[in-house]
Image (cartoon, rainbow, N blue to C red):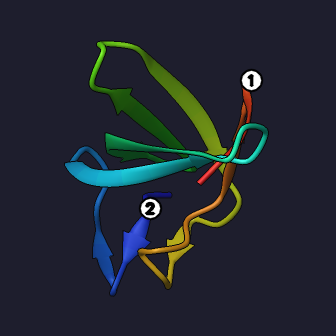
Amino acid sequence: MAVEFKGQNIDGQKLPAKAYYYATGGLYKVQVSFHNKRATIYFDDGNQTIIQLNQQVITDSNNIEGFGIVGNIL
């Protein structure tokens, strides 16, 4: 099942975003793309990480939570 926002499938789109890393309190300017219940986060330095989303239907685009290897990222 695709990730949805406002009733639209947003899988595969690369969108500008901000990622908050709970462990350090750091806020990062990133791009994100969605696929099923996963989000790939692309950092400016070329690194990327994949997180598992807590929800598949996004109701608040300013608060998308998930969990990855490095810990919680928003």
**Residue for point 42% across, 35% down:** 41
In terms of depth relative to the viewer, which is nearer, 25 or 1? 25
| Image vertical order of residue 62 relative to residue 43, above or below | below
In terms of depth relative to the viewer, which is nearer, 14 or 1? 14
Q: Indicate the position of residue 20 as horizontal and vertical percent values.
A: 57, 50
Of helix, strand and loop, which one carries label 1? loop
Return the mark for residue 14.
Answer: none
Taking the image as shown, residue 9 lies to the left or right of residue 67, namely left
Give the quarter of the figure containing the C terminus.
bottom right
In terms of depth relative to the viewer, which is nearer, 18 or 41? 18
Give the number of the mark in front: 2 or 1: 1
Q: Indicate the position of residue 11 as horizontal and vertical percent values.
A: 32, 52
Quarter residue 56 falls in: bottom right
Tell me the residue that label 1 is attached to. 69
**Residue for point 48% across, 83% down:** 60
Q: How far apart are marks 2 and 1 (CA)?
A: 21 Å
Q: Residues within 10 Å of mark 1 (few under 14, many from 20)?
A: few
Q: Earlier in the sequence, mark 2 or mark 1?
A: 2
Tell me the residue that label 2 is attached to. 3
Of helix, strand and loop, which one carries label 2? loop
Quarter residue 38 falls in: top right
Callout 2, which amino acid? Answer: Val
Callout 1, which amino acid? Answer: Ile
